[in-house]
Amino acid sequence: MTALSSTEDQVKGFEVGGVDYVTKPLQHEQLLTRIINHLRIQELSEKLQLQNQELKQQAIELAKAKEAAELASQAKSEFLSNMTHELRTPLNGILGYAQILQRDKTASPKQKHSIDLVYQCGTHLLNLINDILELSKIEARKMELLPKEIHFPTFLISVVEICRIKAQQKGISFIYQPSSYLPAGIVADEKRLRQVLINLLSNAIKFTDHGGVTFKVEVISNDKALQPPLPRIYRDQQEGEEGEEGKVITDKIMPLMGKVSQSPMVKIRFKIEDTGIGIKAEELEKIFLPFEQCGDSAIRDQGTGLGLAISQKIVNLMGSHIKVESTSGKGSVFSVDLDLPTTTVMDHKTKIYTNTIVGFQGKVRKIVVVDDKPKNRSFIVNFLQPLGFKLLEASNGVEGLEKAIEFHPDLIITDLVMPVMDGFEMMRRIRSSEQLKQIMVIATSASVYELEHQQSQDIGWIDILSKPVNVEELLDKLKRHLQLEWVYEQ
């Protein structure tokens, strides 16, 4: 407050810390208004400071909550990883020996039926475990697509064969209708695409007691299906001719290949139609939610209610979504449209044999099996020894290295998690040894997390087998890596 009124004097007043400037003689109303305004400004400033403090506190609490959630998520992931290892390890023995017994020619029909039942129950339990783990991986954003070149017609037939058998067991028809314009090769995540299609087809079969299921695969453009010549229809074996025992059955598969698309990208529509129980309108919104099941309680008890939820999330990762149309009591139609890169025609002479493998040509191959669980080693040894392999066992990485140095095997099959020395350290030492680094190593793991698989490949495994080990997958990897020519039962 001053009698000085020049601009220079006002600037000096503000520079020394004044927040306002009042000149004499005083105007009381003006002074009162200015005092009230500054009091309001002070009050608002204090409120703002308080809000800032509250926001800072909320930010601290949110950071703590985020950290706690991340720790909880990590704990859940670790628990699930440990759980899958503990649950899948005994299943490896159950399913492994069931597969060995299924190949026993001396078993009576009743015994074979019992063995098949054990294998089916074990496989069902494994699928339930896998469903829970798959959903957990998706929620944790740990699932990644791994696209590769696929021979499309052969891939589709492999899906059809699995589902055709399921339909036969229920006594319903299964019709496969591929377009004549399907590309010979596509680029996609084969495992995930197969998982989605088998989930959708298995659901259709499960909820259909009369009539049948139709699986259509079409090339579409501008959301309008092309009109190719009438496609060949691949029906179940009940309506077709029987395959000859011991013959390669690709001859009747290949005519369904159709023409090769020249387009670098193609939109494929997979459509599954059934004449089952259908879905009520009020339940359509819920069927893709985790653990939601519709329909008869006896049918609901057959699964976890995760199949459609997982399939939808996988398809979302592929850039699309599953559509459904349904009428209660009449049936349902599920469809998926995927934009897929095409690739050049690949070798389609994939052989599917019905005869049993009894050995291989050429010299004896030595394999060291490293696993701390005797039952896991025993399964692989008892399965491969009758085929002519020389098997050596080790219970940890140290013993595995000793066996490798002593016998210099053609191949090592090793578990990853073991006492004394785990599979990772054993692999590092093998790769750093001039004497051993040329030995091929296949890792086996009861963990399904892709991270561990990636670590395995980075360390230098040539391949990995998931537990429970499937004997057909094991034989396929042995044939490929050891360059084997199988001998079949005559």
Image (cartoon, rainbow, N blue to C red):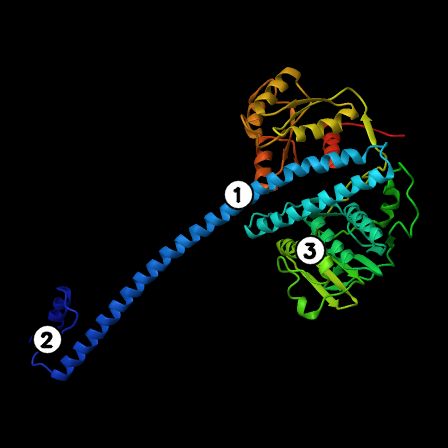
Q: Is residue 44 above or below residue 94?
A: below
Q: CA distance from mark 3 to mark 1?
A: 35 Å
Q: Amino acid at mark 1?
A: Glu
Res 445 quadrant in image: top right
Say which residue label 3 marks.
339
Q: Is residue 372 above or below residue 87?
A: above
Q: Earlier in the sequence, mark 3 or mark 1?
A: 1
Q: Earlier in the sequence, mark 2 or mark 1?
A: 2
Which disc is residue 78 wearing? 1
Q: Is residue 358 above or below residue 310?
A: above
Whether residue 384 appears in this view of the structure is: yes
2 vs 1, front mark: 1
- Dot 1 falls on a residue whose secondary structure is helix
Q: Residue at x 83, y 59 (%)?
A: 212
In the image, taking residue 346 as reference, residue 27 lies left or right, namely: left
Is disc 2 surrounded by few (<14), some (14 to 19) or many (20+) residues within 10 Å?
A: few
Whether residue 352 appears in this view of the structure is: no
In the image, taking residue 365 as reference, residue 414 lies left or right, namely: left
Res 323 quadrant in image: bottom right
- Dot 2 falls on a residue whose secondary structure is loop
Which disc is residue 57 wearing? none
Q: Quadrant of the C terminus?
A: top right
Q: Nearer the viewer, residue 81 or 57?
A: 81
Q: Earlier in the sequence, mark 3 or mark 2?
A: 2
Across and down, in percent, residue 137 comes to 58, 48
Across and down, in percent, residue 126 comes to 68, 44
